[in-house]
Amino acid sequence: MSPLTKKNEVLLLASGDLRLSANQQCWPAQKEMEEALGAAVKDHGYRLVRAHPYNPTEKHGFIASQKQGMEVFATIDRRAPLIVAEAVWQYSHHVLHGLMTHEGPILTVANWSGTWPGLVGMLNLNGSLTKAGVKYSTLWSEDFQDAVFRRKLKRWLETGRVTHPTSHVTKYGNVKMPAAPRRLGSQLAKQLLQEKAIMGVFDEGCMGMFNAIIPDHLLNPTGVFKERLSQSALFYETHRVKDHEAETVRNWMEKKGMTFHTGRKHASELTDRQIRTQCKMYIAAVRIADDFGCDTIGIQYQQGLKDLLPASDLVEGMLNNKSRPPVKSRDGSTTLYKDEPLPHFNEVDECAGLDGLMTYRIHRAMGEPPENTLHDLRWGDYDRTGTVEDYVWVFLISGSAPPAHFIGGWKGASSERQPPMYFPNGGGTLKGISKPGEIVWSRIFVEGGKLKMDLGRAKVVKLPKGETQRRWDATTPQWPIMHAVTYGVSRDQMMARHKSNHIQVAYATTAAKADQAMLAKAAMAEALGLEVAVCGTRANGRGWS
């Protein structure tokens, strides 16, 4: 029998990475957060008790596997109040099983920091809990001293529940929908349902992201069907590609102005051999997609593939760009997916895959830029230089960002080695600073056994070079960055509502075109059976109803 928790005791869990190197490097940040959180809990007359000890052999205190998580949950009081505290990226399936059967109140908490990052880990866990139908509350704070956090923490400790206002959300039925975007969205939905589409999935469930898997019985009614592919097939096909074919891909990028930051040390630098293999993987991915008639593909790229190949991030960014190195069929007779992106969803996030396919078709039909990508909703802060008065989000992702989104396009793109603690075989990123402009953001998620979509409008702003570097240094400087200002959605409103670590973005040529594209996508989603909500306002501050 599990021991009962004492009065005014609150259990703490810390879900971590599967990779020992990541858990060890990130542990000091987690330890610091737990101490600050414990002090806040103590100030309200409660005591925070770790449900699993620090491991002196492995030198961290994270739950590092699903099996370990099961062992922890088997020993704790199922009715105890429970806080899952995250200062790092975490694998949700390490703890999801136990949270699904836990009978006490659950609170997810993250530190407001972009470094490892706990915000992204918590949002993934929140999205996974939402999909699983688990009741939970959530909080976030920069230092766990601010009045709002303290007040809401006290409420949760006393009642087991805390909520956040979401007045920025407008249900689809209340949205004033002009005829043109409604008609376009309905037509594209009808076409998708009639002709259907194939989503190529190179192994499901990247990094335990339960929220990133769409069950077939929810996906198929949208007209999209999975082709379940294997990363082993991608590995095999990559090694069938000739060296001269790979060199042609790299030469194409360099002629367009792409910069590769290379060295000779495989363990810590981006090498020519790593880049050559990535270029082979790009060709292989396009050929396999063509073999199966895929309309969109996603590569898991983390566990398993990272031990065999360099990271796929450079591949993903190329795939999502309309202007990209041409790929010939194996016999050289045909250019595959000629002059078009092959929409790719990073970390095989199927919600982003469906969203990306819809976005691509909407924007292409409107004559708007078809390139789109997901980003991590990584972090945010005010511009320290005062150039931009609004709150500026950091949207950041390792892969999938197309050069068409960058200032200068290919000339503004560069490639740096992925961090060794995540990718032992290296591989270059596709790095750049997103250009100023109007964007549509969106997210598909699963809740209550239904597919849902949230959409909104935002702008990308240009920040001074030093401020951009500060944000890169506070997150991951090797990755592409987008400085985003959401219209009519505050920081806390976004955190309260968003059900994922990922957010989909696409540019439009004007604010009016972005409004139309967003409304058309909302209409398309509604016609496909998704439950739709529009978040925030237009660029001018007007609502949607």
Image (cartoon, rainbow, N blue to C red):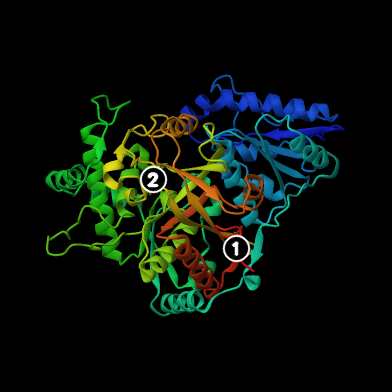
Residue 137 vs 420, above or below: the answer is below
At mark 2, the secondary structure is: loop
Q: Position of residue 64 (x, y in %)?
A: 55, 34
Q: Position of residue 318 (x, y in %)?
A: 29, 50
Near-viewer residue (103 or 255): 255
Residue type at tag 2: Gly
Q: Is residue 312 in view?
A: no
Image-quadrant location for residue 202: bottom left
Q: Position of residue 214 (x, y in %)?
A: 52, 61
Q: Position of residue 353 (x, y in %)?
A: 44, 59
Residue type at tag 1: Val
Question: Residue visible at 73% across and 29% down?
Answer: 145
Q: Residues within 10 Å of mark 1 (few under 14, many from 20)?
A: many
Q: Can you tell which mark lies on residue 534?
A: 1
Image-quadrant location for residue 201: bottom left
Q: Is residue 124 in view?
A: yes
Q: Answer with left or right where residue 305 lies relative to residue 255.
A: right
Near-viewer residue (352 or 520): 520
User: Along the polypeptide, which appears first: circle 2 or circle 1?
Assistant: 2
Q: Answer with left or right where residue 359 lies relative to residue 488.
A: left
Q: Can you tell which mark lies on residue 399?
A: 2
Question: Residue visible at 66% across and 57% down?
Answer: 168
The furthest residue to the top: 56
Image label count: 2
At mark 1, the secondary structure is: strand
Near-viewer residue (97 or 327): 327
Which quadrant of the rendered structure holds the C terminus?
A: bottom right
Near-viewer residue (538 or 41): 538
